[in-house]
Amino acid sequence: MSKTAVIFFSGYGHTRRVAEYVVEGAQASSIEVDENGDITEADWDTLNEADAIIFGAPTYMGGVPWQFKKFADASSKVWFTRGWQDKAFGGFTNSGSLNGDKQVTLSYLQTLAGQHGGLWVSLGLPPANTLSSTRNDVNNLGGSGGVLVQSPSDAGAEAIPDGDLETARLYGERVAKIASRLAS
């Protein structure tokens, strides 16, 4: 079994709820970037020891929030030593709109993984794009690069559609399985 770490920032609780499902699927450690953009030394150790790292951040104004960016910039210390080279990576994001420029955030997360020499894991799920599809279907937003979640801006995290949460759980499971194969 691989060791997977999910690191995320959540401004209003929506991303935290999605992270819980990713963590469940991957049977992963959970690390939350705090409101100042920091994590503990023990969290850095967890990331360094992991076979897979899954990034999570809400999409604010077309990108990751500054708190996650501060963490990403701090990861340059690991980059200098190639400490995360050849790890499996994945990512997830959410925003209030169905589109909400989430793909821009996923591209940022994928680029960060690539800069670290990591191997990005795609979503690997077909889109739910038929007339009979609903918001409770898996991958109902039709992502392929990672998990896309719509979090209604006028409701709490409990209003996130079940299909998005199940997509997150399945993705965590996929990343962990691929990391296990790479580690063996």
Image (cartoon, rainbow, N blue to C red):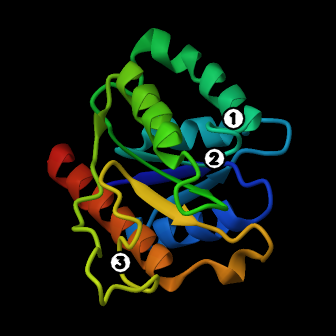
- In space, the residues marked 1 and 3 are separated at their CA atoms by 36 Å
Circle 2: residue type: Thr
In the figure, residue 140 lies in which quadrant? bottom left
| Residue that label 1 marks | 41
Residue depth check, mark 1 versus mark 3: number of the one nearer the observer: 3
Residue 39 % position (x, y): 72, 39
Circle 3: residue type: Val
User: Which residue appears at 55% of the width and 45% of the height?
Assistant: 101
Can the viewer see residue 168 in this picture? Answer: yes
Q: Which mark is residue 138?
A: 3
Q: Residue furthest front?
A: 131
User: Which residue appears at 30% of the width and 39% of the height?
Assistant: 120
Asked whether, in this view, residue 16 is left or right of residue 149, the answer is right
Can the viewer see residue 1 in this picture? Answer: no
User: Which residue appears at 26% of the width and 80% of the height?
Assistant: 130
Residue 21 % position (x, y): 51, 72
Residue 84 % position (x, y): 39, 28
